Image (cartoon, helix red, strand yellow):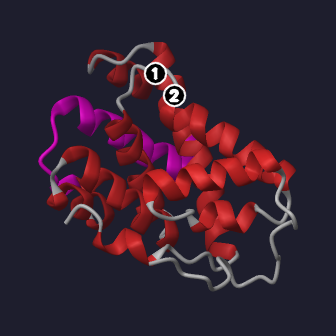
Amino acid sequence: MNDDRQPTALDLPAAEPLPPQTRKYFDLCEEKLGMVPNVLRAYAFDTAKLDAFTAMYNDLMLGPSGLSRLEREMIAVVVSSINRCWYCQVAHGAAVRQLSGRPELGEAMVMNWRMADLDPRQRAMLGFAEKVTKSSAEVEEADRQALRDAGFSDRDIWDIASTVGFFSMSNRVASATGMRPNPEYHAQAR
């Protein structure tokens, strides 16, 4: 089911016609996901902004990293939960459910990640993500060292911080514009 309402509370129609590259990307989303995520539809009014957003997202979430896709999605949900971003909690909670095969994990990430059945590495990662989200200026060398002690490389620490930063930005845009999660997300991987 595709929700044809505007993806946000703002009246920003998609560029018409969409450039061929953008149309191809949207068609690929439709093929692989069964929908075009509303976050992409929201950015379609300005394809330069859409391209910048997708390039950063794809690099952080799908590019080479010492973090698994699941770990990156877990960070996205924890940050989004702290920021109370409805769109990202729903969308990335569904991704955690799907990637983990554990619906309860996706729910715990949204509700209270500390109650989830996590290993020490994941707890260290999410504790750091929480601190960066709430009070990044208070991060000290001891916080980075705790990640190293949990098995993360300095590159991994960069990736954790970058993922937190990206979702902190996108949470604020999504919340401020009234971005609606696609209805399909609610039923996925349950």
Which residue is more in the foreground, 51 or 116? 51
Which residue is more in the foreground, 13 or 107? 13
Question: Which residue is located at x 34 percent, y 60 percent?
Answer: 93
Q: Relative to 146, does residue 119 appear above or below in the rendering?
A: below
- Quadrant where the N terminus sits is bottom left
Question: Which residue is located at x 57 percent, y 63 percent?
Answer: 36
| Residue with the mark numbered 2 | 159
Q: Residue 168: horizontal and vertical position, in percent?
A: 59, 53
As measured in the structure, the alpha-carbon distance from the residue carrying label 2 to the one carrying label 1 is: 7 Å
Q: Which type of secondary structure does the marked residue at label 2 adopt?
A: helix
Which is more foreground, mark 2 or mark 1? 1
The span picked out in magenta is 114-137
Task: Report the disc number at residue 170.
Answer: none
Which residue is more in the foreground, 21 or 7? 21
Q: Is residue 92 in sight in this rendering?
A: yes
Looking at the magenta stretch, what is its main secondary structure?
helix
Q: Which type of secondary structure does the marked residue at label 1 adopt?
A: loop
Q: Is residue 139 in sight in this rendering?
A: no
Q: Residue type at mark 2: give it.
A: Asp
Q: Residue 110: horizontal and vertical position, in percent?
A: 32, 64
Which residue is more in the foreground, 167 or 146? 167
Task: Report the disc number at residue 65.
Answer: 1
**Magenta-colored stretch includes residue 94:** no
**Relative to 6, 147 lies left or right:** left
Q: Residue type at mark 1: give it.
A: Ser
Q: Relative to 181, does residue 75 appear above or below in the rendering?
A: above
